[in-house]
Amino acid sequence: MTKTIDKSQRTTAIPSEERLRQLKQLFPECLTEGEVDPEKLNNLLFCESGGGNRDKNINEIDKNESYRFTWAGKRTAIRLLNMPTEATLKPCRDNSLHFDTSQNLFIEGDNLEVLKLLYKPYFGRIKAIYIDPPYNTGGDFVYPDNYAKPLDTYLQLSGQMDAKGNLQTSNPETSGRYHSTWLSMMYPRLFLARQLLTDDGIIFVSIDDREVHNLRLIMNEIFGEENFIGGFVWRKKAGAGADSKLFFRQHEHILMYAQNIGRIEELFQPLTEKQRSAYKNLDNDPRGLWASTDLTRTGDNDPARIYEVVSPTGKKFTHCWTYTKSNFQQLIDNNLIWWGKTGNSKPKRKRFLKDKKGLTPRSWVDIALTSDGGRDLEKLNLSVFDYPKPVKLIKLFLQIATHSNDLVLDFFSGSCTTAQAVMELNQEDGGTRRFLMVQLPEPTPEKSAARAAGFETIAEIGKERTRRVCEKVDTGFRVFKLAKSNYQTESDVQTDDPQTYISQLEQTLEPLREGWRTEDVLYEIALKEGYPLDSIIEKVGGLAANTVFHITAPDGTQTCHVCLDGKLAETDIERLRLSKDSVFICRDVALDDTLAANLALQCHLKTI
Ligand SMILES: C[S@@+](CC[C@H](N)C(=O)[O-])C[C@H]1O[C@@H](n2cnc3c(N)ncnc32)[C@H](O)[C@@H]1O
């Protein structure tokens, strides 16, 4: 019996291929020779039901008109989204704090490449995303997506490759494609972000008046209009602030969308201090603090609810009540009626603070100003970043969307206010939420406070803030950096010179790039096989000749063995006691035909 040997994944999953697979699975009848036939699909969706006929009629009437949102470059942005990345994430122990024990993550890199790498391991695993992207002010939009070689631009920017020309661009309002450029930047990132959310996950996106209309449209397209939960208006300035001659803008927007609104039953934001202070315990009730609410009913005069009640002091009250007489009596029996301090006031219903889950979120947010964001950094002795969001603001969104052990992502993380908000909220409510920050190593301006303080990039500021807060709350974070894959990639052998081509092709027989490091390769294998970055990688003990690692996903659902040695010793392999369910990954060169055949029968063998 022969068994096939799989190749270990070298690239990331491609979103369009994954969707096509899902479509084929859902509608097998719309396939022609194995491919989806758009006409069949259209007929299936719009012509086979009664409602479909109505749509068909509409289509016929307005054949050349349809409601559609597009911009110059949209197709290219979609193409870019579907290009697999040639990158990996390298662990950086030096930059991390408690690398081996921490589940918090900071990734330095361009977020599009990073999101592509996170697609497989974090698909459907993130409960809340908060992002504060560049608002397209004309000067804040610095990262040019390179459609031909996406990774190269990043490698040049981060100093990992020689820079050709000036990479700093901005998107001035005078540019003919001012909004289009911004939309093309946002589209693939938001698209990938949606794939990472859990079914009941929520995304919050900050924005101001410049692009809020476009953001609504692009979010409607990606998340579905029905998944728009609401838009917050955040009051960010106390005074006027001269940003316009004709109008003082004191607010910003935060749009909130669900991954699937049908999966969200309720949302709460915490009570304000003032609302909490209304809860007292005037009768020392062992059930704790309570507030009282009116019991009289207005609007109708249901005779069944009009009756007389008598207070403990004998005072009589006749009203139309919200409860029937028997239910009212039950409330009295359970000490849930408050008759006032003297016992002869109009009765009220006691409601306990411990039973109050919070308030349904309010659109108007007036809890902290931009200046408070600056103060948050000041308190950490780190006033090196302009206009960070206030910690309190992001904490509010986390209180609405997350619980205990949830994972929170911010892929435009700047100074890492979101990381601080996650850690502080955990301290307050005993949660164990984890964060995943992504930030470009965008150079800080030359004559800035940041540069004077030794911060060359915004990523350095983000890491330092995270480190300072981690130290306060006794936790840590793992740092990874976006870098070129450890595998030789196709583009490595692109040359016009036949001689160079042959010699480069020979080199690709060795799949790993020269100078590879074991830990880097282990993390690349883990990532591309779909293991989250906080997976546990341990060396297997008790082997004589080989070094074998065991990778376990944090939730224990996935495990595999990896050996990167040039030759495998059969005695060591036997000691691993591999079974049919075990996955064993090794280098192609380490196997001869007999060993490969034996191993493939014994376990799920993958080679690199
Ligand atoms: C408005 S700031 C976020 C500020 C953050 N909310 C805070 O409170 O500190 C946007 C950040 O996104 C970063 N950024 C822009 N393009 C990026 C990209 N392609 N990948 C990763 N980060 C990016 C910028 O460097 C900037 O720091």
Image (cartoon, rainbow, N blue to C red):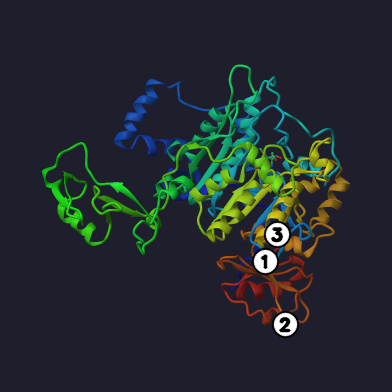
Q: Position of residue 459 (x, y in %)?
A: 74, 46
Q: Residue at x 74, y 81 (%)?
A: 543
Q: Which residue is mark 1?
A: 101
Q: Position of residue 257 (x, y in %)?
A: 49, 41
Q: Residue at x 72, y 53 (%)?
A: 88
Dividing the image into 4 quarters, which one contains the C terminus? bottom right
Whether residue 296 appears in this view of the structure is: yes
Q: Which residue is mark 3?
A: 471
Q: Is residue 433 left or right of residue 280?
A: right
Q: Is residue 148 left or right of residue 128?
A: right
Q: Position of residue 202 (x, y in %)?
A: 50, 46
Q: Is residue 202 left or right of residue 283?
A: right
Q: Earlier in the sequence, mark 2 or mark 3?
A: 3
Decide which of 450, 178 is in the foreground and name it: 450
Q: CA distance from mark 1 to mark 2?
A: 24 Å
Q: Which mark is residue 542?
A: 2
Cβ atoms under marks 2 and 3 closer than 8 Å: no
- Residue 380's place in the image compared with 251, above or below, is below
Say which amino acid is labelled 2.
Gly
Q: CA distance from mark 3 to mark 1?
A: 14 Å
Decide which of 312, 66 is in the foreground and name it: 312
Decide which of 246, 298 is in the foreground and name it: 298
